[in-house]
Amino acid sequence: MRPQSYRVLLPLVFILLPSSCMRAGTPPSIVADSPEPDSVTVTLWRMDERGGTRVADSGPFRLDGTAGRATLTQFGRVGQSRSFRPVLDSFVHVPANPVLDLPRPLTVEAWLYIREFGAYEDTPIAARWTEQAHHQSWIFALGGQRLEPPVTITPSPGYHLALFALRSPGHLWFAYQPETAGPPRAFRSTRPVELERWTHVAVTFDGDVVRFFIDGELDAQFASTGRIRSSSAPLLIGNYFDPRLLTRFAGDLRPDIGDPMAYYALNGLIDELRISSVARRDFPSRARR
């Protein structure tokens, strides 16, 4: 698979004040660390729960998620966050809903604190993508190390080897399945996310251009005209596996998979994950270390 030809432009740097400087009458270009639901917010998971497996959606449609039993709540970038570990039971699952079908435009953004890059080709931040036919819409992920035996115990299952074809630890990847016939299109940021540091990441697509933002700065943009294919895929956060194998055995939502390896599980924290029905341009500008 080859991504559509693209053109990388120099980043645009936005010099913004920290959110702590915001006062009444603050210009709208200054963006708070904690987003508020607005008219184009589809979902907003603040991850502010003190425990349990419910992940509440502050958006207008209240698309609450269910966390795997291996996730924990932990102090985050804004209030609490959800801590993910490299195990199979570490994920947040949001059932399929038609409001998640956003052919264009689309923004996916979040605060990330990454402890370690994945051993295989990628670790998804959020995705509506499965191995089931016609159940692929989009996937927003971090590039992995693409390790192989004997460095790893087992080889990758290969789900994303063709999709994310380059070794790029820590780089942002975005792939989507076009509405028209053809292979998926995949794009990546020019620089990686730093380890052990809160970083705001975002990807936008307006039907003509895919753009990556890191800490409020435009990192890269790629020409890509079209629409994202709609599907009945659920949203999976912080991991990747076949969601059809999820079961509520013993009360918890967990994957009933014969292979216990967590190939694509994210190792880190996610906070303030928002999906919007517009290609946003203003994001938090810097993170505290």
Image (cartoon, rainbow, N blue to C red):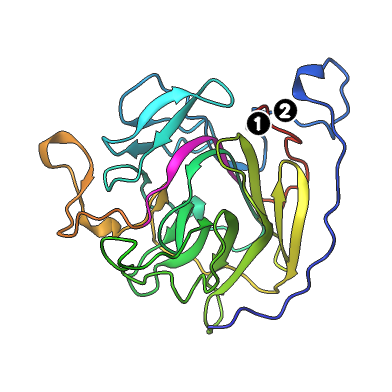
Residue 246 in the image: x percent, y percent?
22, 51
Residue 285 in the image: x percent, y percent?
76, 36
Label 1 residue SS: loop
Number of callouts: 2
Q: Nearer the viewer, residue 152 or 45?
A: 152
Residue drawn at (53%, 76%) of the image: 184
Q: Amino acid at mark 2?
A: Ala
Displayed quadrant of residue 10: bottom right
Residue drawn at (75%, 63%) of the image: 221
Q: Nearer the viewer, residue 86 or 61?
A: 86
Asked if the residues shown at circle 1 and circle 2 are in contact, with their CB atoms under 8 angstroms apart, the answer is yes
Q: Residues within 10 Å of mark 2 (few under 14, many from 20)?
A: some
Label of residue 32 in the image: 2
Quadrant where the C terminus sits is top right
Residue drawn at (37%, 64%) of the image: 130
Asked if residue 188 is positioned above or below residue 41 in the image, the reply reads below
Residue drawn at (62%, 48%) of the image: 193
- The residues colored magenta run 264-276
Q: Amino acid at mark 1?
A: Pro
Q: Is residue 158 magenta?
A: no
The single residue placed furthest to the top in the displayed view is 24
Residue 40 in the image: x percent, y percent?
66, 43
Asked if residue 159 is positioned above or below residue 288 in the image, the reply reads below
Mark 1–mark 2 Cα distance, whole angstroms, equals: 6 Å
Label 2 residue SS: loop
- Residue at the disc numbered 1: 35
Q: Nearer the viewer, residue 214 or 182?
A: 214
Horizontal relation, residue 141 to residue 21: left or right: left
